[in-house]
Amino acid sequence: MKKISIAICLLLISAFALQSCEDMDDNAVPVNDFIWKGLNLYYLWQPEIPNLADDRFGNQGELNAFLQSYSSPEALFNSLLYVDPTNPAKSDRFSVLVSDYNVLEATLQGVAKSNGVEFGLVYTDASQTSIFGYVRYILPDSDASTKDIQRGDIFYAVNGTPLTPSNYRSLLAADTYTLNLADYNDGTITPNGEEVSLTKFQYGEDPVYFADVVYNEGGKTIGYLMYNGFFSSYDNELNTAFGNLAAQGVNELVLDLRYNGGGSVRTATYLASMITGQFEGQLLAKEQWNPKLQDYFENNNPNALVNNFAGALNDGTGINHLNLNKVYILTTGSTASASELIINCLKPYIDVVQIGTTTIGKNAGSVTLYDSADFSKNDVDPSHRYAMQPLVLKIVNKNNFGDYEEGISPDIEMPEDYDNLGEIGNPSEPLLATAISQITANGRMMPQQPGREHKIFKTSKTMQPFGDEMYIEEVPQNLGHLVKELP
């Protein structure tokens, strides 16, 4: 009897093991299945990735076996990204997978933990073994706004530990830390014994940092706008700023995008419409998707591929505009994506004078994909919160130009001077002063002695996920039938 019981137990165990193996073969890892099918449909470089080919797998079982060979969703996702073997600048540097879409959604609207110090990290010298930080601006109503720290301050260490390319993230990621300050003199960093302790809190950044008239003489009323992120939740604030500039009779504009890493394509369309106004309804930018989606849109919904100059915001509010035929744009190596869209897509319509240094070179846009039947947030899989922000489209201007992967070069080269960053909005601030001199002196520049240029390493924004994204607000509707289904 005992032998029979043992035999029955062994038989049941074998059957259970066999069933488990069959289940593993028949059922894909849910997150991995979502990643593959989302990238197969939407990824910009889908044709160039062999493992994303429509005919790569003959049935769902083969796909499941492939998906189960990866140790994590992140490992699978990274293996499917495009790498250009001859030009790293053309590789996919920006697609992202996240484990919590709530964090993603907040970050795309400028909400993140911050102590209020927006900074740049640059290499100290050509050896690229050490770095230092400089304060770009202080966010209002933040912890830093109550401390003795300001734009132009230099820091070389955190909690007494000198910054390096290998330790910066762990030092600056903490919620509370102390910055050790230094003096800067023609490239030399000298610790000065001063320090500032800072604490991070959840913070929503209004990207309209400064908007006012900075010069009003001789028939020239120059408005200056520092705009630090294309966050669609602040579209009305941006529109209000332009209304105020228009009410003051602004007829020249200096648009400061030097610290703007991008954001919403729709918001960029609004900004272009506010600068101009005379081109409402005309084509500003065109979207180029992967071949199968491009073909679908061209044959079924061609209007989905165009972004036109607008006359109203998404909520129906009329757009305030300046009707300008020329704009002066300030840039640095932190100017990216939607900021570059503004430069590239306005050029066919008005004169764009770019002052500063070469931009990043991000001409591709992304969209948030959720794990649902059509990759929208409707009926999302409740078992996890993974989402993707893959590059899905390339933006080109009216003349079909969008090849600026290595950045957009300025008309007037003017690196920031770490000896003299100047005060934001002050007409004597070096980059703004250069723009004003171009406007008021018939193009004759004031004599300037550019400071020593240091190569940018990271910024407080690029340390955040999605700090330099360009994205469309929602995944295109009614494309669920195009999702690859295997037998």
Image (cartoon, rainbow, N blue to C red):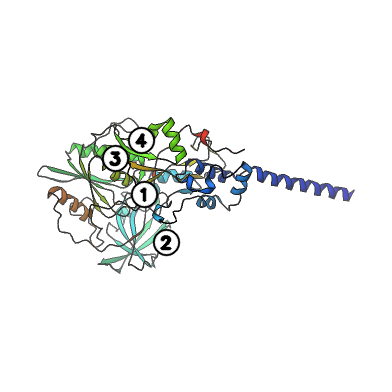
- Which residue is under mark 3? 271
- Which residue is labeled 4 in the image? 306
**Mark with earlier residue (1, 3):** 3
Are the residues flagged by discs 3 and 2 in contact, CB closer than 8 Å?
Answer: no
- Pick out the residue farthest to the left: 218
The residue that mark 2 highlights is: 171
Residue closer to the observer: 421 or 91: 91
Position of the C terminus by quadrant: top right
Q: CA distance from mark 3 to mark 2?
A: 36 Å
Work out how far the residue at label 4 is from the one at label 2, CA to CA, in angstroms.
44 Å
Q: Identify whether 238 is placed above or below 166.
A: above
Nearer the N terminus, badge 4 or badge 2? 2
Which of marks 1 and 4 precedes in the sequence? 4
> What kind of residue is marked 2?
Leu
Compute the Cα span from label 2 to label 1. 28 Å
Give x and y (percent) for residue 308: 32, 34
Q: Disc 1 designates what residue?
A: 362
SS of the residue at dot 3? helix
The answer to which of marks 2 and 1 sits earlier in the sequence is: 2
Are discs 4 and 2 less than 8 Å apart at CB?
A: no
Instruction: Residue at 59% x, 39% y: name it.
Output: 486
